[in-house]
Image: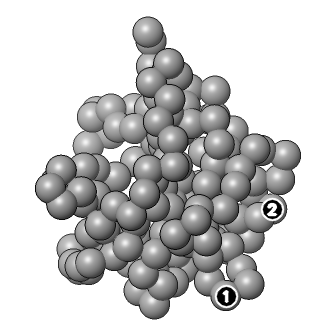
């Protein structure tokens, strides 16, 4: 599957006073009516554990200049997302309270409506609550063959 280019996003959730997040390349649109998206997370990850108890989350679809942000959120362990966005423009989503990275190609907030175990991953089907921004002039960041790459215009 490393041969398949995929967009790169950061999934974030607010858990009480803490903020968590992770970089993913398994985020997809499922339906326009109603608007649904799906994200796949490693079942043993802490973000998955938190999303099983917190229904609302955000997805920031990164732009070609945000490979450093993607790398920070791909860090192993459980660093607070507030530390990971330090020095990076961001805001809190109105519906989820989750951190939203600014400067990407798009951002959305979702509410989980279905959870599906799938091998060593868990699929979270989310109803889109809001689209924070869409910036079609920016090029997306993609992951291909294990590396982040800017998409050529």
At horizontal 47% and vertical 36% (from top left) the residue drawn is 134
Instruction: Please tell me the numbered disc located at residue 83.
Output: 2
Q: Residues within 10 Å of mark 2 (few under 14, many from 20)?
A: few
Q: Is residue 36 above or below residue 77?
A: above
Residue 67 placement (x, y as % from top left): 62, 35
* Mark 1: secondary structure: loop
Image quadrant occupied by the C terminus: top left
Instruction: Please tell me the numbered disc located at residue 16.
Output: 1
Q: Nearer the viewer, residue 53 or 26?
A: 53
At horizontal 26% and vertical 78% (from top left) the residue drawn is 113
Residue 98 placement (x, y as % from top left): 60, 67
- Left or right? Give the position of 58 relative to 26: right
At horizontal 59% and vertical 62% (from top left) the residue drawn is 93
Q: Earlier in the sequence, mark 2 or mark 1?
A: 1
Q: Is residue 106 above or below residue 64?
A: below
Tag nearer the camera, 2 or 1? 1
- Of all residues, the one furthest to the right in this rendering is 87
Query: How far is disc 2 from disc 1 in space, using C-alphas?
Result: 16 Å
Would you say the residues marked 2 and 1 are in contact, meaning their CB atoms lie under 8 Å apart? Answer: no
Residue 20 placement (x, y as % from top left): 63, 71
């Amino acid at each position: 599957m490393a041969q398949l280019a995929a967009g790169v996003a950061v999934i974030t959730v607010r858990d009480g006073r803490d903020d968590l997040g992770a970089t993913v390349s398994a985020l997809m649109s499922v339906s326009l009516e109603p608007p649904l998206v799906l994200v796949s997370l490693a079942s043993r990850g802490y973000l998955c554990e938190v999303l099983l108890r917190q229904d609302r989350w955000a997805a920031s679809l990164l732009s070609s200049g945000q490979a450093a942000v993607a790398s920070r959120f791909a860090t192993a362990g459980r660093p607070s997302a507030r530390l990971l966005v330090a020095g990076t423009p961001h805001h809190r989503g109105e519906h989820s309270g989750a951190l939203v990275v600014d400067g990407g190609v798009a951002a959305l907030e979702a509410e989980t409506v279905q959870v599906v175990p799938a091998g060593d991953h868990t699929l979270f089907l989310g109803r889109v609550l809001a689209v924070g921004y869409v910036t079609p002039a920016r090029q997306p960041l993609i992951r291909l063959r294990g590396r982040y790459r800017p998409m050529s215009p």
